[in-house]
Image: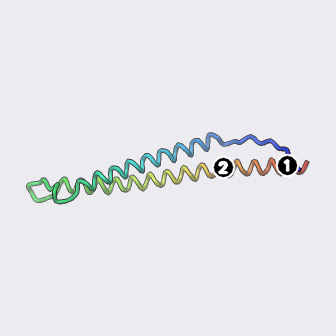
Amino acid sequence: MSIQYTYHPQYQAAKATGALIALVGWVVFLLGLAGFIVGAAFTGPLFDDSWSGVPTTAFAGAAGAIFSLQLALIGLLLAGAGQHFRATADAANHSGEILAIMKATKS
């Protein structure tokens, strides 16, 4: 016995928006990771270019690395939010399909 039902998936715009948010999040994460690597490369005694004894370039590299690490974390949070957004739209679609199946079995 097979159940005949029709269901047309909805929430395509929501799923696309979630995918876009996740994509932006991954791009921000990769940029933050690259910035961290570059910033970390500019720290250390080789980059002490100041005559006053204050390592300006090394300090700027460390500050850039810390900022980029925070940017990478924000990117991960954005990617997770986009995935959550898509999962919510999928759950709504599956609930609609279950409802269509239940209506088909009643009649």
On the picture, is 14 further left or further right than 38? right
On the picture, is 39 further left or further right than 70? left
Q: Which residue is mark 2?
A: 90
Q: Secondary structure at mark 2?
A: helix
Q: Which residue is mark 1?
A: 103
Give the image location of residue 77, x and y in percent: 48, 55
Location of residue 56 (image quadrant):
bottom left
Identify the residue at image location x=9%, y=57%. Answer: 52
Identify the amino acid type marked 2: Asp
Q: Is residue 34 above or below residue 16?
A: below
Identify the residue at image location x=25%, y=54%. Answer: 41
- Real-space Cα separation, disc 1 to disc 2, in angstroms: 20 Å
Identify the residue at image location x=44%, y=51%. Answer: 75
Q: Secondary structure at mark 1?
A: helix
> Callout 1 environment at 10 Å: few (<14), some (14 to 19), or many (20+)?
few
Give the image location of residue 26, x and y in percent: 46, 48
Identify the amino acid type marked 1: Lys
Give the image location of residue 73, x and y in percent: 42, 56
Q: Is residue 20 above or below residue 75?
A: above
> Callout 2 environment at 10 Å: few (<14), some (14 to 19), or many (20+)?
some
Give the image location of residue 53, x and y in percent: 11, 59
- Tag 2 or tag 1, which sits nearer the N-term? 2
As drawn, the residue found furthest toward the right would be 107
As drawn, the residue found furthest toward the left would be 51
Find residue 34 and name its label: none
Callout 1 touching callout 2 (CB < 8 Å): no
Labels in figure, total: 2
